[in-house]
Image (cartoon, coloured by chain):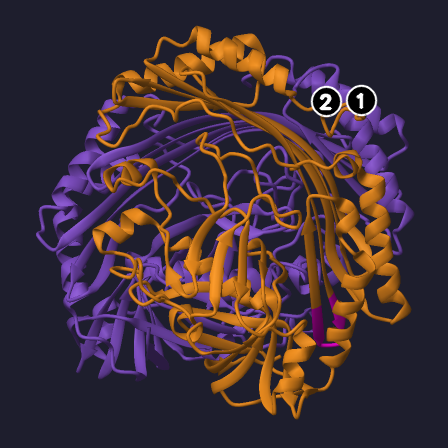
Chain colours: A orange, B purple
């Protein structure tokens, strides 16, 4: 059943309509290979700050992209106009580009037709959610903060996407995807606390629970002290762990690996992190944002990236995969990091284990400092605390860190079960909170 | 205008908005065409040609905002979207503890066309791909250079803005840019060196005059020199920063904190707030007396010089920092009154028809001083000259920053001597700008811009230009990256 059947207008591009549009493109194209991709997005965001709505938007954007190849010459053109005349013009543009493009030695025809995994990527309650539902959730968060005499800033968003890919060799895939997000920063005087959630179902955002978490962090942040920079034992909450792991994933591309310009050079098949850690892609996991296929027309499937600390997988483009004899290209849109052996249940259990540590809620503005060893920098944000004798004793001013995940994830002391991690910089992952030793903070800021 | 019926659609939308009882409404219809050609390791890896058309309706109803947008430009869709914008604004108003009030702006009727000599979309594609392949070939002639990339980008926007106040503005805006990179490997390390034109509102003449092929051997040689250079020894150094490098420093440490919406908390959940709080305007010492940072959205060819912003407010020039004192913000019609100003500075921009306009950094530039670049360097005993962009990170209030660069030369006893690598400097924004003791003169002034400035939820990409002459900063802490 289509998740959006109950919506009257605007109607998303259905599977049948995409097939019709794709057929239109494929009939008009004179290319040796032609591929059509659809991204029809309808979403809205209610944004609030200072306990009032500051932005409230709803946007519908449909984009059709046509890629045409003559031999190894290819071109791509896109349009937001789905009328027959515009589609014809878009095909002609792609053809014009392809005819005069130089041959691409790495060009490959579209992937062969196949049956893609059917996943529950769309939830009707999210597709049906409109401005009123988003406003209701925003009001709930604002109301909680008003009661505490605190300031709320955040978003509630919901969206539905009709995504498809079709090609002249018979490849065809289509699915609807929904996504709902909530994030909240609570301000208590100069202190801030934060929490966030993302899910295919808007019913799973846990507004009240998340709001209370952010309020608690903000209130604890009022009592703040400054500590000197240096190496510290840290307890990283899942969002902070996700921030560092995302940079590992983003730099795992196989082409850089083959050319010797990757921080993972010569480490495939070798241990790169603590041996308890295993990273998988689990697109069928109900709490992750997995899909059935990629924009290229490849299936999204379970994949083992790091097994007991050993690097098992690289992010292959199709050409490099063919050159290396890799049959199946792994994706990582639904990352799941877990640990073997004894684990704690929650972050709170890790706090109880520490005599002295810094608890980090989240990192901000993470960037690469040294590409060779993957040294990163970034700031702690929205809840950085001193833990003494198994409990939080005060907030501390935010630190800048200077660290490589390839070093610190070999210094794991304890982990929890995987939990939701959603940040503005990483998307959604399921990762544990962790205790790491000798995490290097290089400087301190003024708040 | 690309579509003859745009005025009809715009007027239809505004009639619906007016009939709803809303106090204000506007519509932007926009068609953006872009072309991006990307090369990698001597091959043309992608040629993407996009045509993105749609409209967005913004409504202020009883002090609450609503915005709705669609890529379906039809007589059926426009009323639906206009009505939805009104409905959303009503919802916002129902929770409005404080009503939005817009400051006054005269009614404008105008047409803005940015200057161009050569239309990049009319330049044969073969000419562009040949240029990129040749430059990558040149770069990879250096034996130690193992990878190369090169790209050309152009975008043209046709826009129609109408408001319920009677303003009608037409725009024909063009922007271009090109760049290439060489990556060298040595002794288990790798390092890149780049050449980039600024993003400017000009035509293909920007690329033609940049002379990529003449620059390629230098860039390749410097990539090799960089990867083989000794690592920097941490410590305090005097820094001389080139204009391209300064554009990012200005952007992060002055541009963002001078956005008034940030200072007021609108971005607290994402991009962050600002240490330049409203009580500091006119009294806070941001930098040394050498530091004059001026917002100028009127300078031809710069990214934010579009005649009017997306509030329909005329582009202007004003001071952000005058002789080291923080004096001004970037504003829009909503927030200007919150600091007692009666007119917006005209810095409200959306990145597409589907996005609502938000306060954006203006074209903030560092005003030239009186020294020559040689004079700045001559007065440095132990320093580093930094060119281009590298690693960058800053806290959410814009105090604690850390920057790298694209290339670094040691300065010893007043002379640039040799390259060093892995240079990272960090500090606190006011102390850093307070350590500025010289800016080179206007003959050294260069302009660089950004089209990927992230802000807003949903995220938007802002466009602005930052001009500067090289500047010197004393005793800045440098660490090894």
Q: Nearer the viewer, residue A25 or B386?
A: A25
* Alpha carbons under labels 1 and 2: distance apart: 6 Å
Q: Residue at left 81%, top 26%?
A: A6
Chain at numbered mark 2:
A
Magenta span contains residue A125: no
Tell whether label 2 touches label 1 (CB within 8 Å).
Answer: yes
**Residue beneath disc 1:** A8
Q: Which image quadrant is residue A31 in?
A: top left
Q: Main secondary structure of the magenta part?
A: strand
Image quarter in which the N terminus of chain B is found: top right
Chain at numbered mark 1:
A
Q: Residues within 10 Å of mark 1 (few under 14, many from 20)?
A: few
Mark 1 and mark 2 on one chain = yes
Q: Is residue A271 left or right of residue B259?
A: left
Magenta stretch? A186-193
**Residue beneath disc 2:** A11
* Image location of residue B21, percent across then percent down: 90, 32
Q: Residue at left 72%, top 48%?
A: B333
Q: Residue at left 32%, top 63%?
A: A371
Image quarter in which the C terminus of chain B is found: bottom left
Q: Residues within 10 Å of mark 2 (few under 14, many from 20)?
A: few
Q: Is residue B479 visible?
A: yes
């Amino acid at each position: 059943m289509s998740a959006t059947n109950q919506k009257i207008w605007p109607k998303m591009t259905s599977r049948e309509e995409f097939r019709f549009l794709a057929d239109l493109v494929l009939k008009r194209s004179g290319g040796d290979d032609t591929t059509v991709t659809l991204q029809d997005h309808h979403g809205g965001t209610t944004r609030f700050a200072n306990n009032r709505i500051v932005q409230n938007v709803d946007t519908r954007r449909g984009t059709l992209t046509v890629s045409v190849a003559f031999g190894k010459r290819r071109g791509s053109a896109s349009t937001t106009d789905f009328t027959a005349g515009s589609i014809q013009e878009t095909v002609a543009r792609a053809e014009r580009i392809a005819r005069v493009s130089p041959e691409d030695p790495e060009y490959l025809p579209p992937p062969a037709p196949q049956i893609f995994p059917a996943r529950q990527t769309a939830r009707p309650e999210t597709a049906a959610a409109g401005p009123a539902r988003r406003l209701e959730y925003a009001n709930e968060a604002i109301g909680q903060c008003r009661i505490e005499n605190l300031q709320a800033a955040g978003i509630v968003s919901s969206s539905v996407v009709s995504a498809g890919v079709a090609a002249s060799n018979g490849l065809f895939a289509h699915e609807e995807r929904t996504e709902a997000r909530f994030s909240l920063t609570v301000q208590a005087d100069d202190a801030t606390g934060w929490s966030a959630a993302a899910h295919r179902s808007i019913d799973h955002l846990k507004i009240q629970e998340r709001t209370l978490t952010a309020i608690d962090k903000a209130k604890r942040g009022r009592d703040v002290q400054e500590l000197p920079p240096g190496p510290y034992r840290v307890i990283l909450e899942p969002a902070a762990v996700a921030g560092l792991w995302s940079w590992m994933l983003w730099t795992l591309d196989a082409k850089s690996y083959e050319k010797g310009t990757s921080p993972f050079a010569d480490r495939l098949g070798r241990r790169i992190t603590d041996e308890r850690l295993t990273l998988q892609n689990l697109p069928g996991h109900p709490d992750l944002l997995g899909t059935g296929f990629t924009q290229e027309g490849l299936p999204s499937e379970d994949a083992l990236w790091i097994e007991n600390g050993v690097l098992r997988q690289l992010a292959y483009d199709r050409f490099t995969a063919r050159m290396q004899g890799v049959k199946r290209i792994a994706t990582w849109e639904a990352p799941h990091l877990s640990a073997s052996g004894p684990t704690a249940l929650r972050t709170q259990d890790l706090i109880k284990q520490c005599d002295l540590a810094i608890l980090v809620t989240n990192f901000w503005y993470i960037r690469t400092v040294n590409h060779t060893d993957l040294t990163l920098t970034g700031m702690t944000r929205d809840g950085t605390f001193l833990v003494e004798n198994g409990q939080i004793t005060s907030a501390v001013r935010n630190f800048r860190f200077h660290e490589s995940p390839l070093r610190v994830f070999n210094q794991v002391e304890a982990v929890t079960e995987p939990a939701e991690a959603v940040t503005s910089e990483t998307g959604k992952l399921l990762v544990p909170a962790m205790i790491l030793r000798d995490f290097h903070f290089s400087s301190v800021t003024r708040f | 205008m690309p579509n003859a019926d745009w005025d009809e659609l715009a007027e239809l939308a505004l009639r619906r908005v007016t009939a709803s009882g809303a106090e204000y409404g506007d519509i932007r219809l926009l068609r953006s065409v872009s072309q991006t050609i990307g090369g990698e390791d001597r091959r043309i890896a992608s040629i993407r040609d996009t045509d993105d058309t749609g409209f967005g309706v913004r409504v202020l109803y009883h002090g609450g905002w609503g915005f709705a947008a669609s890529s379906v430009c039809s007589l059926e869709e426009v009323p639906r979207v206009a009505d939805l914008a009104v409905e959303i604004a009503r919802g916002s108003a129902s929770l409005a503890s404080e009503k939005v009030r817009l400051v006054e702006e005269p009614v404008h009727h105008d047409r803005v066309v940015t200057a161009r000599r050569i239309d990049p979309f009319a330049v044969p594609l073969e000419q562009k791909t040949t240029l990129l392949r040749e430059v990558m070939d040149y770069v990879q002639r250096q034996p130690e250079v193992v990878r190369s990339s090169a790209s050309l980008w152009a975008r043209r926007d046709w826009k129609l803005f109408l408001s319920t106040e009677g303003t009608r503005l037409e725009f024909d805006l063009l922007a271009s840019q090109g760049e290439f990179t060489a990556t060298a490997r040595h002794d288990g390390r790798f390092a890149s060196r780049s050449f980039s034109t600024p993003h400017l509102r000009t035509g293909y003449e920007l690329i033609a005059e940049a002379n990529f092929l003449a620059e390629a051997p230098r860039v390749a040689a410097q990539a090799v020199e960089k990867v083989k250079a000794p690592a920097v020894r941490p410590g305090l150094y005097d820094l001389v920063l080139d204009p391209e490098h300064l554009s990012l420093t200005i952007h992060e440490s002055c541009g963002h904190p001078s956005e008034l919406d940030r200072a007021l908390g609108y971005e607290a959940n994402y991009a962050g707030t600002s240490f330049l709080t409203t009580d500091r305007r006119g009294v806070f010492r941001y930098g040394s007396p050498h530091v004059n940072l001026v917002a100028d959205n009127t300078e031809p060819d710069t990214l934010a010089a579009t005649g009017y912003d997306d509030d329909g407010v005329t582009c202007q020039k004003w001071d952000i920092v005058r002789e080291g004192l923080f004096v001004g913000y970037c504003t829009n019609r909503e927030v200007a009154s919150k600091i007692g100003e009666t007119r917006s500075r005209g810095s409200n921009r959306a990145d597409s028809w589907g996005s609502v306009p938000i306060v954006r950094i203006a074209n903030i530039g560092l005003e030239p001083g009186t020294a020559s670049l040689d004079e700045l360097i001559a007065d440095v005993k132990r320093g580093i000259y930094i060119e281009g962009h590298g690693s960058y990170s800053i806290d959410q209030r814009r105090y604690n920053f850390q920057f790298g660069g694209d290339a670094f030369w040691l300065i010893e006893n007043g002379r640039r001597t040799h390259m060093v690598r892995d240079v990272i400097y960090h500090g606190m924004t006011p102390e850093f700008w307070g350590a500025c003791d010289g800016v080179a003169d206007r003959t050294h002034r260069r302009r660089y811009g950004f089209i990927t400035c992230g802000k807003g939820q949903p995220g938007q990409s802002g466009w602005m230009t930052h001009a500067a002459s090289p500047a010197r900063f004393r005793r800045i802490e440098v660490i090894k990256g």
